[in-house]
Image (cartoon, rainbow, N blue to C red):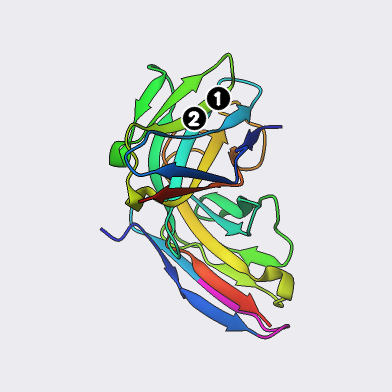
């Protein structure tokens, strides 16, 4: 019962480098999203997707790209890493619409440090 | 716009005592409310949610929460705390009528520390 799987768990990047955080879910959920967690700020939405081929911006989208070519996968790309993107990143998924009462399930997180 | 407030950064409770982690919310309509727990270096785990019906919701690990519409609160409670309950707790609200790109807004989190 894998649920939401994120890779890598830990990553150190140099400023200006690009990378992709991978996210996969095996629950056939339509809705997927990426959050970042910073101390004292809770979780903030970066991008989300309501189904394959459909993505949209959240609260803090700058510096990040996403795509949703399949229902299962929702990768997050950092285009040119900056120290301000040092954070913990969480992928999440749920069934049905974004305004539903369905439970959102989170991955284990990806700890990213940009030096 | 919807919002969630967790007024305490940290709550300290002796093991065996009851615990309460506070959460208040603001939405335009009837809310969907969630509690999640995060252990060190781990993801968020779902504890419980309120969608409709009984105001007292029971969840995982003996936790419960009471929805109070007049006070716009959804406090998390447990009758007898365990040291293993020590973690970071997040309250979240979803406005089923809209209000934001995702409709899900998190509080800033409350560190719960259970002292042996």
- Asked if residue A19 lies in the magenta stretch, the reply is yes
Q: Which mark is residue A34?
A: none
The magenta segment is A14-21
Q: Position of residue A88 (x, y in %)?
A: 56, 65
Q: Residue at x 54, y 38 (%)?
A: B92
**Would residue B88 be seen by someone viewing this image from the given angle?**
yes
Is residue B81 depicted above or below A74 in this figure?
above
Q: Residue at x 36, y 36 (%)?
A: B17
Q: Residue at x 63, y 37 (%)?
A: B7
Residue lying furthest left: A1
Q: Categorize mark 2 by other alpha carbons within 10 Å: few (<14), some (14-19), many (20+).
A: some
Q: Position of residue B53 (x, y in %)?
A: 39, 17
Q: Categorize mark 1 by other alpha carbons within 10 Å: few (<14), some (14-19), many (20+).
A: some
Q: Position of residue B66 (x, y in %)?
A: 44, 23
Q: Chain of mark 2?
A: B
Q: Are marks 2 and 1 on the same chain?
A: yes
Q: Nearer the viewer, residue A57 or B77?
A: B77
Q: Circle 1 sits in a helix, a strand or a loop, which is it? A: strand
Q: Quadrant of residue B65?
A: top left
Q: Which residue is mark 1?
A: B73
């Amino acid at each position: 019962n894998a649920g939401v799987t994120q890779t890598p768990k830990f990553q150190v990047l140099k400023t200006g480098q690009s990378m992709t955080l991978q996210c996969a879910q095996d629950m056939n959920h339509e809705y997927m999203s990426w959050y970042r967690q910073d101390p004292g700020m809770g979780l903030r939405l970066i991008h989300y997707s309501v189904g394959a081929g459909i993505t949209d911006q959240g609260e803090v989208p700058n510096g990040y790209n996403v795509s949703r070519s399949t229902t299962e996968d929702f990768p997050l790309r950092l285009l040119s890493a900056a120290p301000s993107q040092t954070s913990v990143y969480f992928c999440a998924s749920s069934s049905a619409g974004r305004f539903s009462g369905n439970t959102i399930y989170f991955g284990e997180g990806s700890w990213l440090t940009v030096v | 716009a919807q919002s969630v407030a967790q007024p305490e950064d940290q709550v300290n409770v002796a093991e065996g005592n009851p615990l309460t982690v506070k959460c208040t919310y603001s939405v335009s309509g009837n809310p969907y409310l969630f509690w999640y727990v995060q252990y060190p270096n781990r993801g968020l785990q779902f504890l419980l949610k309120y969608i409709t019906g009984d105001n007292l919701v029971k969840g995982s690990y003996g936790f419960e929460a009471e929805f109070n519409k007049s006070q716009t609160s959804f406090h998390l409670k447990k009758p007898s705390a365990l040291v293993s309950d020590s973690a970071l707790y997040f309250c979240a609200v979803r406005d089923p009528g809209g209000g934001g790109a995702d409709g899900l807004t998190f509080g800033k989190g409350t560190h719960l520390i259970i002292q042996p």
